[in-house]
Amino acid sequence: MQQVVTGVVLDPDGAPISFTFENRHYLVSSRPVRWYSRKIWWQQAQSAPKGVGSALVEVEMWRLWATSEFDRIFLELRHQQPDGVWEIYRIDS
């Protein structure tokens, strides 16, 4: 089960600058790096709604450092489209 990140605030270029995870507010403390990964679309999609073809095969990923009042973490976030859900893909403390 993926861990969901809430309250994601983005800069004008679409990069995350803050979010909430496990009831802690984090500020992104490094320049986030974005790339796109492939989904296992044949296991996840029943059918393709018109206009969302790329969202079926690609997922936006972000690698960054984030700091809260209590800790600093390194993580990779996955931004699921078209629903806009943000999840933690990998986390290191």
Image (spheres, rainbow, N blue to C red):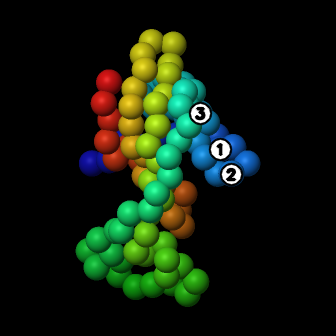
Q: Residue furthest right?
A: 12
Q: Earlier in the sequence, mark 3 or mark 1?
A: 1
Residue 71: image quadrant is: top left
Q: Classify 69 as above or below 50.
A: above
Q: Which of the two discs, 2 and 1, sits closer to the camera?
A: 2
Amino acid type, label 2: Asp
Q: Identity of the amino acid at label 1?
A: Leu
Residue 72, placed above or below residue 36: above
Is residue 85 visible in the rendered image? The answer is no
Residue occupied by mark 2:
13
Q: Amino acid at mark 3?
A: Ser
Instruction: Please indicate whether residue 52 sits to the left or right of residue 2 in the image.
Output: right
Position of residue 44 in the picture relative to residue 36 (left or right): left
Looking at the rendered structure, the secondary structure element under dot 2 is loop
Residue position for label 1: 10
Tag 3 residue: 18
In the image, 19: left or right of 38? right
Asked whether 38 or 69 is in front, the reply is 38
- Cβ–Cβ under 8 Å for marks 2 and 1: yes
77 shown above or below 17: below
Mark earlier in primary sequence (2, 3):
2
* Quarter of the picture holding the C terminus: top left
In the figure, is residue 72 to the left or right of 6?
Answer: left
Residue at 50 percent of width and 46 percent of height: 33
Task: Say which residue appears at 53% left-offset and 79% top-offset.
Answer: 52
Q: Position of residue 55 (x, y in %)?
A: 48, 72
Q: Nearer the viewer, residue 22 or 11?
A: 11
| Contact check, label 2 and label 3, Cβ < 8 Å | no
The CA span between labels 3 and 1 is 7 Å
> How many numbered discs?
3
